[in-house]
Image: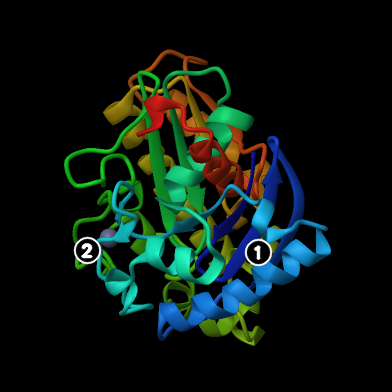
Amino acid sequence: MQIIAVDLGGTKTKAGIVKNSKLIGRNEFTAKSSGSLLSYLSFVKRNLLLLCEKSNTDPADLNGIGIASTGIIDNKKNRVLSVNKKYPDATQIDFSQWADEELGLPLILENDANAAMLGEWRYGEAKSTDNCIMLTLGTGIGSSVICNGHPLRGKHFQAGILGGHFIVNYNGRKCTCRGKGCVEAEASTWALPDIVRNDPEFNKSILSNLPVIDYKELFSAAEKKDKLSVKIRDNSMLVWAACTVSLIHAYDPEIVVFGGGIMKSAHIILPYITSYVEKHAWVKKGQVKIVKAKHIEDAALFGLYSLFCKQPEYI
Ligand SMILES: [Zn+2]
């Protein structure tokens, strides 16, 4: 079995060829910030063909293509169901038809958090567990749940994936989902620049001199004791920890796996969340493991591969 897997991503798109459970080739490129997803897919296709060439893989030998995308995904019909402000045409695209016409390959479309969870469940930190949660901290906040040995799907394909839209502050900041005070509106990479720039202490902060404000810069400035950075870092960790407790209460896992770009600061974030869970969650100490993903960048690529292996419990 070998497939080409694509994680469309919020800020960068990652692609890989997974053969017999191993990633044998990989590349990544900056994701298009907005516009037509169909035209972006043409760009992605060119990169996929280059990746095949670089990895000495004949596209005709591939068993299929897997794509992981944000949003609510109908994984039976391979369609995006939720309106996407970034790519307004996403709901109109017939992905199966695109893959057939452009690459001559069968396609599986999956929500990106679900794909990452499946990757960690089959090939990573959650291997041989039956109840696990993945939280992805990045541009947005994604979640996904395996419950009693099955991925949660729900009636409308959204069970378990909306942890980023759990409300942690009902009078809080406006979210992209029309909600207020969601986890990702209060602490995610897309929300961070606004949170920082609207703080009255912004002009006194190291961050005011930076062209780009992200969590890498925030954690670095907080280590230098920048007052605003320490305050926002600590509030962000509190938001993620509160979200973790709600997910644990909702789904009763044995392990919570954390992935996403913000996990570059896992050495600070995970001890904080572990301690918060021990204090505030309805679980015994040590009952739920809190860990960093094994495939911090590529879990979704492995998850897409696992879907092609057709374990019946996946669907
Ligand atoms: Zn929301």
Q: Position of residue 166 (x, y in %)?
A: 27, 49
How many badges with numbers are in the image? 2
Q: Secondary structure at mark 1?
A: helix
Q: Secondary structure at mark 2?
A: loop
Kindly report the distance in space between the C-alpha atoms of the residues bearing marks 1 and 2: 25 Å
Left/right placement of residue 310 relative to residue 173 reads right
Q: Quadrant of the N terminus?
A: top right
Q: Which residue is mark 2?
A: 180
Chain-order first, disc 1 or disc 2: 2
Q: Residue at x 26, y 46 (%)?
A: 158
Q: Residue at x 25, y 46 (%)?
A: 157
Question: Quarter-wise, where is residue 185 in the image?
Answer: bottom left
Left/right placement of residue 210 relative to residue 97 reads right
Indicate the quadrant of ligand 1 in the picture: bottom left
Q: Nearer the viewer, residue 160 or 201?
A: 160
In the rendered image, the vertical position of residue 204 relative to residue 284, given as above or below? below
